[in-house]
Amino acid sequence: GGLVSEKLVKDPASISCSDVYKPSVERAASKGYSATQSNETVCSTAKDAIVIAGKPDVVKVVCGDIRKVESDALIISVAGGVSLATLEEELPGRRCVRVMPNTPCLVGEAASGYAMGKLCTDNDREIVQKLLGAVGVAKEIKEVLLNAVTGLSGSGPAYVYQFIEALADGGVRSGL
């Protein structure tokens, strides 16, 4: 959504996405994205970047799908806890970036950390900055710090929202 609202892409249909869960594919299609259940289809049309946004336990399977397609697109992983070493081992010769955005990206106020892989270029860094900058601020950090970013920044805002909601509920129960 941030990429579309910030006009980094011409229209939503220029974003391809896949999911094995059919309702997610339908929801993405209803927003105008090119949606499919095939990772290979997405990878074959990717020009600038392929984003791995799945749970850590499916990353190796997704990497297998990516390997099947010849592409020069940058691989950007938002899968928590999956190291650059693992990505680079699963995707030999591919440029990989590990990213951790947070919930406020949904409203354009994200604070994201990212670490560049061994084969990444300055152009790749610009791509990551543009993508993450469309939904907030982004800071390149050492990969060793990404787990802390995941725990604090990645999950922290959701806990704060829960706390605020609980305060509001308490106020309502007290008659406010």
Image (cartoon, helix red, strand yellow):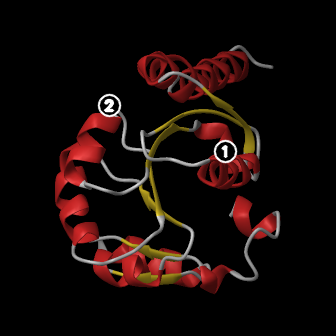
Q: Mark 2 touching mark 1, by CB under 8 A? A: no
Q: Which circle's residue, 2 or 1, is located before the other in the chain?
A: 2
> Which SS class for mark 1?
helix
Which mark is in front, 2 or 1?
Answer: 2
Quarter of the image where the C terminus is located: top right
Mark 2–mark 1 distance (CA, rounded to whole Å): 19 Å
Q: Is residue 75 left or right of residue 60?
A: right
On screen, residue 36 above or below 125: below
Q: Position of residue 136 (x, y in %)?
A: 75, 41
- The type of residue carrying mark 2 is Gly
On screen, residue 43 above or below 146: below
- Identified at 25% across, 54% down, the residue is 92
The residue at which mark 2 appears reads as: 81
- Picture quadrant where residue 94 is located: bottom left
| Label at residue 105 | 1
- Identified at 45% across, 19% down, the residue is 151
Q: Is residue 166 left or right of residue 172?
A: left
- Picture quadrant where residue 163 is located: top right
- Identified at 40% across, 79% down, the residue is 42
Q: Residues within 10 Å of mark 2 (few under 14, many from 20)?
A: some
